[in-house]
Image (cartoon, rainbow, N blue to C red):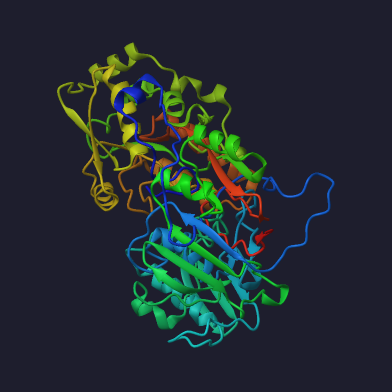
């Protein structure tokens, strides 16, 4: 899966002995690192509550200053194109977070059936549960670049963008456009009307109408060549220089819809792609990047904080990133519930947390991220499902006629962290005689294998979702994604999940989601999370009003400013 709010995809390498003995021994060396000019930027992240490190308690908040250039870095590699719909990094951290606007955005904790944050939309109406009407803010214009040439933003651009996502099989996520959206129309230049197939309890969440890559308002002139077309939008910044996959320079768009308020405050944002962890550290320490999003190792965050002290701010939060283990239950041996239960009996989820994340985080009692607090089960309800018993595990395998001579294929994206997770599972499975053959593959190959089902087990880090919608869909027969082999294929479970997605009353929905988790655990679902980890973001103290957000969605952060 993709890197999202949480740890980046590169880590200091550790050997197998270090992992299995529990001592990661990750050393935070500051490698020699030179950037020709600049740093980079990264997005999303964290906790409930305001970010730390602004004014002392009781002190008057400083007045924001306009100007300056923010140096930032993105710690995952984008593909070699500008397409925000198909290119993960571009859609969230690059053009999707700077150039393109959105109707609305979201924040963690809102009632996703009815609450949202206005962006390009001036108003939202829900005359009935299956009709959503947006009115655009008046006077919005696109940036003055060919072939768009500064023309007004039209509702038709929103319609064409949504249809482009719906019809593009390479879209990173189009579950709303395919599964929820019945139609989208523009009765006039300022009005967008969505008709839904059914009520949508997660309508305004970051997995539906505010999903970062499928909600960009893209000029219709660009849609035929979006991979290569220079990004042109109505967002807070214009892209003025780009070396694809290396460096991007964004400059304030003077025609931005909030320009009269002085936003965005920062004149320019320069972003570099820095995927090596040691290079990230060196860039941050030398102030070639003012923000270090997703520090890869907890003890490295500690060291940076000790070394730089009051000159920096360190935000930390329990990530909403999924870290799932999935068994392919569409074929033997995991089609047999006894084999799946055997995995529950030998797996030590806390060991994943201890070895990979130095114990900083939590093990969920149910099937959802711990950060989704209102949907959490009481540990007393679930302890029986997670109780370790190696003898019982072996007996379950024998009763199922499990072939102890067979090697099961386990796949993960070829990243140090994911590889280490496979080794942990391999070692745990060996205690009951289950043979695991780890296979590390590039992302594109992994993505294809996940779709074809040519695997027995997979494990890995994924984006941070703000509602149960996406996580439960992985348990459904129709996952609405390429991960088509992760669920039970159980009709009754499917009906429960579908009902939860259409239950607009928040309290009823919470109860139903809890019931779904118990129903899945009773069947020893092949898809569960090993743990949730603590994530860290460091920034130099002169970066003011940096908004931290735990879910994976694009953040403009127009009110961020530089006090230097």
Q: Tell me: residue 250, above or below residue 493.
A: below
Q: Is residue 117 left or right of residue 527?
A: right
Q: Quadrant of residue 544?
A: bottom right
Q: Tell me: residue 83, above or below residue 89.
A: below
Residue farthest left in this picture: 405
Of residues 119 and 502, the one drawn nearer to the viewer in this rendering: 119
Q: Is residue 260 left or right of residue 279?
A: right
**Residue 144, position in %: x, y?**
52, 85
Q: Can you say which quadrant of the picture contains the C terminus?
A: bottom right
Q: Tell me: residue 521, above or below residue 445.
A: above
**Residue 182, position in %: x, y?**
46, 68
Residue drawn at (36%, 54%) of the image: 481
Residue 341 visible (yes or no): no
Residue drawn at (47%, 62%) of the image: 37
Of residues 514 and 228, the one drawn nearer to the viewer in this rendering: 228
Residue farthest top in this picture: 391
Residue 377 visible (yes or no): yes
Of residues 522 and 380, the one drawn nearer to the viewer in this rendering: 380
Residue drawn at (55%, 73%) of the image: 251
Q: Is residue 506 left or right of residue 455?
A: right
């Amino acid at each position: 899966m993709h890197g999202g709010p949480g740890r980046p995809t590169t880590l200091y390498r550790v050997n197998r002995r270090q992992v299995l003995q529990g001592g990661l021994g990750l050393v935070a060396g500051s490698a020699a690192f030179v950037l020709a000019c600049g740093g980079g930027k990264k997005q999303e992240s964290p906790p409930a509550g305001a970010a730390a490190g602004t004014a002392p308690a009781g002190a008057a908040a400083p007045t924001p200053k306009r100007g300056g250039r923010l140096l930032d870095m993105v710690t995952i590699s984008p593909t070699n194109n500008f397409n925000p719909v198909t290119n993960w990094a571009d859609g969230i951290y690059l053009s999707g977070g700077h150039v393109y606007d959105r109707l609305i955005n979201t924040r963690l904790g809102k009632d996703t059936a009815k609450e949202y944050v206005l962006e390009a939309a001036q108003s939202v109406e829900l005359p009935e549960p299956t009709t959503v009407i947006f009115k655009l803010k008046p006077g919005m214009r696109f940036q003055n670049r060919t072939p768009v040439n500064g023309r007004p933003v039209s509702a038709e651009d929103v319609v064409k963008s949504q249809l482009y996502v719906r019809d593009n099989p390479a879209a990173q996520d189009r579950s709303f456009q395919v599964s929820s959206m019945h139609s989208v129309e523009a009765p006039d230049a300022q009005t967008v009307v969505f008709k839904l197939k059914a009520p949508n309890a997660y309508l305004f969440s970051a997995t539906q109408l505010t999903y970062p890559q499928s909600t960009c308002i893209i000029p219709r002139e660009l849609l035929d060549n979006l991979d290569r077309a220079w990004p042109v939008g109505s967002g807070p910044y214009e892209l003025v220089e780009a070396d694809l996959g290396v460096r991007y320079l964004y400059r304030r768009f003077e025609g931005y819809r909030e320009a009269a308020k002085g936003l965005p405050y920062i004149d320019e944002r320069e972003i570099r792609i820095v995927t090596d962890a040691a290079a990230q550290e060196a860039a941050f320490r030398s102030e070639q990047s003012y923000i270090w999003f997703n520090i890869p190792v907890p003890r490295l965050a500690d060291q940076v904080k000790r070394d730089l002290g009051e000159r920096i701010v360190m935000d930390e939060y329990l990530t909403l990133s999924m870290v799932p283990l999935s068994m392919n239950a569409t074929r033997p041996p995991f089609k047999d519930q006894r084999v799946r239960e055997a995995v529950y009996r030998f797996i030590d989820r806390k060991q994943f947390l201890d070895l990979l994340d130095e114990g900083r985080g939590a093990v969920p009692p149910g099937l959802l991220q711990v950060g989704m607090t209102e949907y959490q089960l009481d540990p007393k309800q679930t302890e029986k499902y997670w109780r370790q018993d190696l003898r019982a595990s072996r007996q379950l395998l024998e009763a199922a006629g499990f072939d102890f001579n067979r090697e099961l294929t386990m796949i993960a994206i070829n990243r140090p962290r994911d590889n280490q997770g496979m080794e942990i599972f391999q070692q745990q499975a060996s205690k009951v005689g289950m043979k695991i053959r780890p296979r590390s593959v590039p992302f594109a190959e992994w993505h294809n294998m996940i779709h074809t089902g040519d695997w027995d087990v997979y494990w890995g880090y994924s984006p941070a979702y703000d509602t149960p919608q996406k996580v439960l869909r992985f348990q459904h027969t129709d996952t609405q994604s390429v991960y088509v082999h992760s669920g039970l294929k159980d009709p009754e479970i499917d009906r429960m999940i579908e009902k939860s997605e259409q239950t607009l009353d928040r309290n009823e929905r919470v109860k139903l989601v809890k019931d779904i988790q118990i129903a899945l655990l009773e069947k020893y679902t092949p898809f569960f999370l090993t743990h949730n980890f603590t994530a860290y973001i460091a920034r130099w103290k002169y970066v003011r009003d940096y908004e931290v957000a735990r879910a994976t969605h694009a953040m403009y952060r127009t009110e961020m400013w530089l006090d230097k």
